[in-house]
Amino acid sequence: MKFDELLAVSGLPGLYTMVANKSNGLIIEELKTKKRRFASSRKHQFSPLASIGIYTDDGDTIELKKVFRNMNDQYEDTPPPAVNAKDDDLREYFEDVLPTYDKDRVKVSDIKKAIKWFLFLRENASGLFQEDDKADEMDTSE
């Protein structure tokens, strides 16, 4: 599995991969249970994780993939706080992971979602971060 294949689906918990595309929605597979279901495009919005970015102070964005990589690199020294931790603790952790994040535009709910997704992927998609590191090394060597 690659990071580019992961989807967040509005109104549904967890993360998914797309199995098939239909004219009125997608057939998706939940990462944890491998259960497949149809998600209507009338009811849900589909966001590939590869298209999500975090705002930075310079007005640009940084890919969520890079934020997750920073979180993974610092996991042993600075593990993420619980999702229900105090807002100040969440912001302090995120500042350690991404010092240039835009404190005005990135909401606490965004930080909670990023931490939640990161922990979910770390638990349910073992090797995802190592695979992406290898793929990035191959891309830069070409």
Image: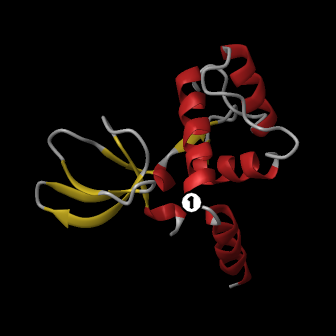
| Residue that lies at the very extreme toward the front in this rendered image | 33
The structure residue drawn at horizontal position 66% and vertical position 15%, both measured from the top left corner, is 87
User: Which quadrant is the C terminus positioned in?
Assistant: bottom right
The structure residue drawn at horizontal position 54% and vertical position 29%, both measured from the top left corner, is 110
Q: Is residue 30 above or below residue 135?
A: above
Q: Is residue 23 above or below residue 114?
A: below
Q: In this orientation, which residue lies closer to the viewer: 43 or 12?
A: 12
Question: What is the number of callouts on the image?
Answer: 1
| Residue that lies at the very extreme toward the left in this rendered image | 23
- The three-letter amino acid code for the residue at tag 1 is Ala
The residue tagged 1 is: 125
Question: Where residue 35 sits: x, y (%)?
Answer: 32, 57
| Residue that lies at the very extreme toward the bottom in this rendered image | 142
Question: Where residue 38 sits: x, y (%)?
Answer: 19, 54
The structure residue drawn at horizontal position 61% and vertical position 40%, both measured from the top left corner, is 60
Q: In this orientation, which residue lies closer to the viewer: 105 or 48?
A: 48
Q: Is residue 16 above or below residue 61?
A: below
The structure residue drawn at horizontal position 11% and vertical position 60%, both measured from the top left corner, is 23
Question: Where residue 9 sits: x, y (%)?
Answer: 34, 44
Q: Residues within 10 Å of mark 1 (few under 14, many from 20)?
A: some
- Which coloring applies here? secondary structure
